Image (cartoon, grey):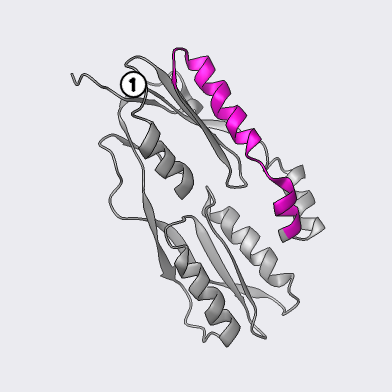
Amino acid sequence: MFARTLTLILTLALAAPAMAEVSAYATGAVQVLSKATLGARQKSGFSKFKARAKDFHGAYFISKQGDKGSFWVDEHRLEDAKGYAKAACEEQGAGPCVLYAVILPAGAPKGRGALVKGINASLSRDLIRHSGKGDPGTFGAAAVNRMGQNGMGWGYESRERARKEALFTCIKGIDRQTFKDQVSAKVYNQAVASGRFDCKLVVEFKK
């Protein structure tokens, strides 16, 4: 066996056998899904969206009428990015908005073990960077919410301490005010009511 073995345990099934090592996507790519002709403002917005191509998962919506558009990136779930981008687009008052492009994970995953899915680019890169740190036998964990925030803890002697640190850093990173300023009161209240700010563990690893 390798002197440094990284063991991954999905917290949705803590009793499941551990899988050797961990891998995650380090970058993303834009996929255009529509043949619509963009207006000047929409082209400008799409250029900014493409500049965030590494930050999966993302979505760019454009208005059917007028020259409006909006995007959302670095979400753990593509559906959440779509929902926020569409709501922000339609709040501009240009009528119904349609999906123009998305950002999805791309390239070969970094690492040699089990692929961790359902996380955004920020956590993926953190996981690649930090999951191998710490002394042999120590534990790490990561937690996320449905607002794109995440938290990690690694190098702890107990699994419980790693879990607590991951949840603590996830909760600490929540910025409700910024999100509230970006969306309508209706979208914000729906996010709160549906528990999208709540953090939960998604992965654990042992070095």
Side (left or right) of 57 relative to 169: left
Residue at the extreme right: 185
**Closest to the observer, 175 or 184:** 175
Instruction: Judge whether residue 159 is colored magenta.
Output: yes
User: On the rendered image, what quadrant is the N terminus found in?
Assistant: top left
Q: Secondary structure at mark 1?
A: loop
Side (left or right) of 178 relative to 47: right
Q: Quadrant of residue 9?
A: top left
Residue type at mark 1: give it.
Answer: Lys
* Residue drawn at x 70%, y 40% as measured from the top left: 195
**Closest to the observer, 7 or 44:** 44
Q: Eyeballing the image, is 1 above or below 183? A: above
Which residues, given as a range, are shown in magenta?
A: 155-181
* Residue drawn at x 72%, y 43% as measured from the top left: 194
Q: Is residue 111 visible?
A: yes
- Residue that numbered label 1 is attached to: 207
* Residue drawn at x 40%, y 44% as measured from the top left: 125
- Packing grade of label 1 (10 A; few <14, some 14-19, many >=20) is many
Q: Eyeballing the image, is 153 above or below 99? A: above
Q: Quadrant of residue 65?
A: bottom right
Instruction: Judge whether residue 143 is colored magenta.
Output: no
Give how far across and how far down residue 40 sits, in percent: 57, 86
Magenta region, main secondary structure = helix
Give how far across and how far down residue 203 sits, in percent: 46, 30
